[in-house]
Image: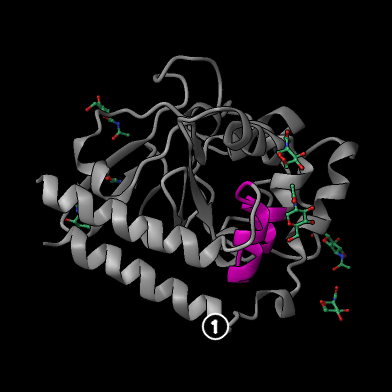
């Protein structure tokens, strides 16, 4: 057990060294930008105060941060108007819901007690709960609305862990308790349309339309050296993980 822990710390150190060979604190946005298919999530991190919160937590605390980062495809897979119907505070909560205020390495998911407390809401773990179940290399996530799993380890350095998810995690507290005025049954999945006049929301939601226009060229993935190093590192961690 100690051996395994030591190996993992050692590999994490190598990863950290390879990826952060320049000095200074971890630049969270940069890590996401390098991967290339998180442009929508990055935009929402910047549009809300969540990016600053994450930076502050990384700067000022030792407990670290864990982020479940939805891909651009995850956002375009949302049913039409999902984001437009949210108020700004709800959008903030939605993004905070993807962040945990402690560093959780891949090996630790099995030992966590559900539900996990996310950065959304108050200090109660029951307000915006997130459940994870893990076995072997797979980590499943359930919110009561969204079921998905971690599809890859984007980054892990002992302070910050970023996991890719292929669905946006929708919190029950926002999407489970919709007033009956909305729709009698869960809305069928529709592709995002440029024409959003169907959205029954206030005038102040029109600027969200920009969020729905994904720039496909921004999603081109990067096959530079760092990416390769990165995958190499991540698979080493996985290999150890499965020992
Ligand atoms: C992080 O990197 C992004 C670009 O990748 C840059 O715009 C931003 O200023 C950097 N933040 C810090 C705190 O260095
Ligand atoms: C975190 O630290 C970096 C560099 O020390 C600084 O540029 C950045 O503004 C800090 N971010 C926050 C949110 O305090
Ligand atoms: C994760 O979900 C998949 C598909 O729903 C399932 O086959 C698998 O057993 C689940 N794993 C865990 C650890 O819950
Ligand atoms: C999450 O886990 C808790 C504790 O096991 C359980 O009570 C709750 O029903 C679970 N919720 C979901 C959505 O899986
Ligand atoms: C999500 O997963 C839970 C178990 O974690 C399961 O009880 C539930 O039926 C699943 N929901 C959907 C919509 O697949
Ligand atoms: C947008 O949708 C509305 C209602 O469905 C329709 O009346 C209108 O013509 C559409 N506009 C465009 C540009 O497609
Ligand atoms: C998409 O991004 C590319 C380069 O980043 C830019 O040249 C192009 O104009 C953008 N297209 C749109 C529709 O924003």
Q: Which residue is located at x 49 percent, y 67 percent?
A: 18
Residue 13 percent across, percent down from the top left: 39, 56
Number of marks in the image?
A: 1
Q: Quick check: can you spot residue 165? A: no
Q: Quick check: can you spot residue 102? A: yes
From the viewer's perspective, tell me whether residue 46 is left or right of residue 144: right
- Chief secondary structure of the magenta portion: helix
Residue 33 painted magenta = yes
For the C terminus, the image quarter is: bottom left
Residue 125 percent across, percent down from the top left: 40, 20
Q: Which residue is located at x 37 percent, y 69 percent?
A: 233
Q: Quadrant of ligand 3?
A: bottom left
From the viewer's perspective, tell me whether residue 88 is left or right of residue 90: right
Residue 62 percent across, percent down from the top left: 48, 30
Residue 186 percent across, percent down from the top left: 49, 44
| Residue furthest right in the image | 203
Residue 98 painted magenta = no
For the residue pair 207 and 149, the one nearer the viewer reads as 149
**The magenta stretch spans which residues?**
25-42
Name which quarter of the figure residue 218 lies in.
bottom right
Check disc 1 and report the residue beneath it: 225
Q: Which residue is located at x 60 percent, y 60 percent?
A: 31
Q: Indicate whether 56 appears above or below 137.
A: above
Q: Residues within 10 Å of mark 1 (few under 14, many from 20)?
A: few
Find numbered disc 1 in the image and state the secondary structure of the residue it sits on: helix
């Amino acid at each position: 057990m100690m051996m395994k822990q030591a190996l993992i710390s050692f590999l994490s150190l190598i990863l950290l060294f390879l990826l952060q060979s320049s000095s200074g604190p971890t630049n969270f946005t940069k890590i996401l930008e390098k991967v290339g298919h998180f442009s929508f999530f990055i935009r929402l991190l910047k549009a809300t105060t969540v990016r600053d919160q994450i930076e502050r937590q990384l700067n000022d605390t030792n407990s670290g941060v864990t982020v479940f980062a939805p891909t651009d495809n995850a956002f375009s897979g949302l049913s039409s108007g999902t984001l437009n119907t949210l108020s700004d505070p709800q959008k903030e909560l939605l993004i905070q819901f993807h962040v945990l205020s402690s560093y959780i390495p891949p090996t630790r998911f099995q030992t966590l007690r559900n539900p996990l407390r996310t950065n959304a809401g108050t200090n109660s773990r029951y307000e915006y709960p997130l459940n994870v179940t893990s076995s072997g290399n797979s980590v499943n996530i359930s919110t009561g609305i969204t079921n998905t799993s971690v599809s890859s380890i984007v980054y892990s350095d002992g302070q910050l862990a970023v996991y890719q998810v292929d669905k946006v995690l929708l919190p029950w507290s926002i999407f489970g308790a919709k007033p009956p005025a909305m729709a009698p049954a869960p809305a069928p999945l529709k592709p995002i349309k440029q024409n959003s006049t169907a959205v029954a929301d206030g005038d102040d939601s029109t600027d969200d339309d920009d969020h729905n226009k994904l720039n496909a060229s921004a999603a081109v993935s990067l096959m530079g050296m760092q990416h390769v190093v990165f995958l190499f590192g991540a698979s080493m961690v996985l290999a150890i993980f499965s020992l």
